[in-house]
């Protein structure tokens, strides 16, 4: 578990975080918002738009290796239609990361042209990464900053914990990401964050969570679910019934021949999180799932 995952958000902490991010945003030309491609709605922070205001922004749809490619492409189109360039990426393998600098240059193209017209040629472009815990911020920064040195020249905004990586010619990345909280007052959002493992399992009922996930998969990805667990008819079955069927198929029994649904739950959640059930996206463009205010 990453350190960021153990962050407990409380009002005072949120206010401090908000101030820190506002401060960092003043140092950069653009923000790179990183989201989880499997839950493009739930993995966003509720006040980010407000924080970013008119600062140019790009969206990085991370973990696209585990998301449904058809849905990811729809989301990219959706963001583009709203003027935000988006890029599906995979920080595990580094896929598409070479598109990051061109993406930011694209969103800043007018500004860059203005700088050039004023003779400010070679002015570095500075960017910071923001996102909720566990979405892949550290993985992204580590990948992008590989082989590059932190720039420690004397300049406003450069402190020991606030340095810049040169990740391309004339292109700098703030070494610390902005860690934001998710929208956890919404039950569906909380549930989806728990499905993906963004929220710790100790705080949730594992069997209940796995049963709910199975119902969601039954409705959204029935073929993948049937295939993974060699199930026949699943339409109309309740989550617990599916869990029992799966436990039985996998021979997960406890003494007396009862099905070990606890073990089956852990397995189902692990397999979902490892994309073994398939490449799955739980939120689609056009659903009424709190997209307002993008
Ligand atoms: P954070 O800084 O935003 O909190 O996220 P972090 O980079 O720590 O990533 C959280 C988890 O997500 C890590 O797994 C990381 O390996 C994984 N991850 C990040 N990007 C991708 C991606 O594009 N695809 C996949 N499949 N996984 C990704 P972990 O289990 O916490 O650690 P580990 O297994 O890497 O040791």
Image: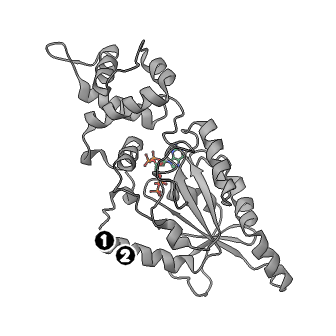
Q: Is residue 294 above or below residue 197?
A: below
Q: Which residue is mark 1?
A: 11
The reply to whether residue 73 is visible in this rendering is yes
Asked where in the image residue 132 lies, by quadrant, the reply is bottom left
Q: Is mark 2 within 8 Å of ligand 1?
A: no
User: SS of the residue at dot 1?
Assistant: helix
Residue tagged 2: 15
Instruction: Give the residue drawn at x 51%, y 82%.
Output: 159
Residue beneath the point at 42% across and 43% down: 196
Q: Is residue 22 left or right of residue 246?
A: right
> Where's residue 156, x and y in %?
58, 87
Q: From the image, which quarter does the C terminus lie in?
A: bottom right
Quick check: marks 2 and 1 in contact, CB under 8 Å?
A: yes
51 relative to 71 in the view: left or right: left
Mark 2 is surrounded, within 10 Å at the Cα level, by few (under 14), some (14 to 19) or many (20 or more) other residues, namely few
Residue drawn 32% across the image and 64% down it = 9
Q: Nearer the viewer, residue 279 or 56?
A: 56
Up-down relation of residue 158 to residue 14 (above or below): below
Between 281 and 286, the residue placed more toward the observer is 286
Residue 256 circle label:
none
Q: Position of residue 44 (x, y in %)?
A: 48, 57
Residue shown at the point (48%, 18%) measured from the top left: 227
Residue nearer the viewer, 115 or 46: 46
Q: Quick one: SS at disc 2? A: helix
């Amino acid at each position: 578990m990453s350190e960021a995952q153990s962050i407990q958000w409380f009002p005072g902490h949120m206010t401090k975080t908000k101030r820190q991010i506002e401060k960092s945003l003043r140092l950069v030309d653009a923000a790179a918002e990183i989201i989880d491609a499997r839950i493009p709605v739930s993995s966003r922070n509720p006040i980010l738009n407000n924080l970013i205001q008119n600062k140019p922004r790009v969206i990085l749809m991370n973990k696209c290796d585990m998301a449904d490619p058809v849905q990811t492409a729809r989301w990219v189109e959706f963001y583009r239609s709203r003027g935000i360039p988006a890029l599906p990426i995979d920080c595990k393998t580094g896929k598409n990361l070479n598109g990051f600098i061109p993406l930011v240059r694209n969103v800043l193209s007018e500004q860059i042209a203005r700088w050039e017209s004023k003779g400010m040629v070679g002015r570095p472009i500075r960017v910071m990464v923001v996102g909720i815990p566990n979405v892949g911020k550290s993985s992204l920064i580590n990948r992008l900053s590989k082989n590059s040195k932190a720039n420690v020249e004397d300049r406003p905004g450069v402190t020991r914990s606030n340095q810049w990586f040169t990740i391309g010619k004339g292109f700098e990345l703030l070494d610390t990401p902005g860690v934001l909280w998710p929208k956890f007052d919404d039950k569906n959002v909380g549930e989806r964050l728990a499905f993906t493992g963004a929220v710790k399992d100790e705080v949730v009922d594992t069997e209940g969570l796995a049963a709910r996930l199975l119902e969601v998969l039954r409705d959204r990805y029935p073929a993948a679910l049937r295939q993974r667990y060699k199930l026949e008819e699943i339409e109309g079955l309740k989550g617990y019934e599916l869990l029992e069927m799966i436990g039985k198929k996998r021979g997960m029994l406890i003494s007396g021949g009862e099905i070990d649904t606890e073990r089956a739950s852990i397995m189902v959640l692990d397999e979902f999180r490892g994309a073994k059930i398939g490449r799955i996206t739980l939120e689609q463009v056009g659903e009424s799932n709190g997209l307002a205010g993008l």
